[in-house]
Image (tube, rainbow, N blue to C red):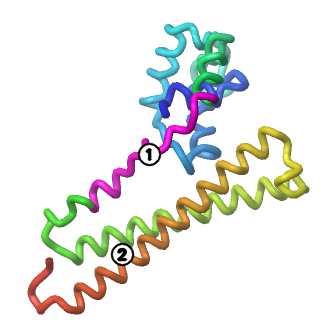
Amino acid sequence: MSLEHILLGCLEEPASGYDLKTHFNQRIRQFWSAELSQIYPTLKRLERRGWLTSHTEPSPKGPPRTVYTRTPDGREGLILWLTGGPEVGSERFSYLAQIFFMDQVGDLHATRRFMLDVRARMAAWHAALLQVESEERAAAGKPPEQFSAPGLHRFIALRMGIHSVGSKIAWCDETVAVLDARLASTPEGETQ
């Protein structure tokens, strides 16, 4: 999966880079994150490729803003990606890489603190996703199987995010229990 394809999907309607960042934060965070420092160069690259066009318009606040629109070639690139089969196994988790190498710190207490921090962040993220789900269900006023096509597909992705983050919370709990058992059996003064 690439940021290029994600941005093409987001540009069903014209938007600025800032609008897209807001969209990431509110709607896509359960499966993809991106910073403005990544979004703007990618938009420029897509424009050079002919997959986007842009124009400048006044901004309600601050300087004029650049608004991007997907071209027919950009839509074709998006459709090819969407119908090209699932891209499974391409996830990257920085916190998991940190845990993988955490033995180099030499302190299981530090590992435990790290895991509790991961859990707290996952719990906050999970609560936010559940809030989005609640708001979407209330706004639709009908069960998910009766949502509009875009609403249904967004709901399906949201539910995967909820399940994924929930399983990560369970993994944190399991890991802290293992660390607690290990720490309880470690002679005093030893930390690893």
User: Is there any visible trace of residue 17 in the rendered image?
Assistant: yes
Q: Is mark 1 on a helix, strand or loop?
A: loop
Give above or below for 33 relative to 109. above
Q: Give the range drawn in magenta.
A: 83-99
State yes or no: residue 116 in magenta.
no
User: Does residue 119 appear to the left or right of 131 in the view shown?
Assistant: left
Q: Residues within 10 Å of mark 1 (few under 14, many from 20)?
A: few
* Amino acid identity at mark 2: Thr
Residue 126, placed above or below residue 108: above
Percent from the top left, x then y, of residue 159?
A: 66, 56
Query: Amino acid type of disc 1?
Result: Gly
Coordinates of residue 66 in the picture (x, y in percent): 59, 17
Q: Which of 118 and 81 is in front in this view?
A: 81
The numbered mark at residue 89 is: 1
Q: What residue is drawn where x is 59% and y is 62%?
A: 163
At horizontal 29% and vertical 88% (from top left) the residue drawn is 181
Tag shown at residue 175:
2
**Viewer-nearest residue: 167 or 33:** 167
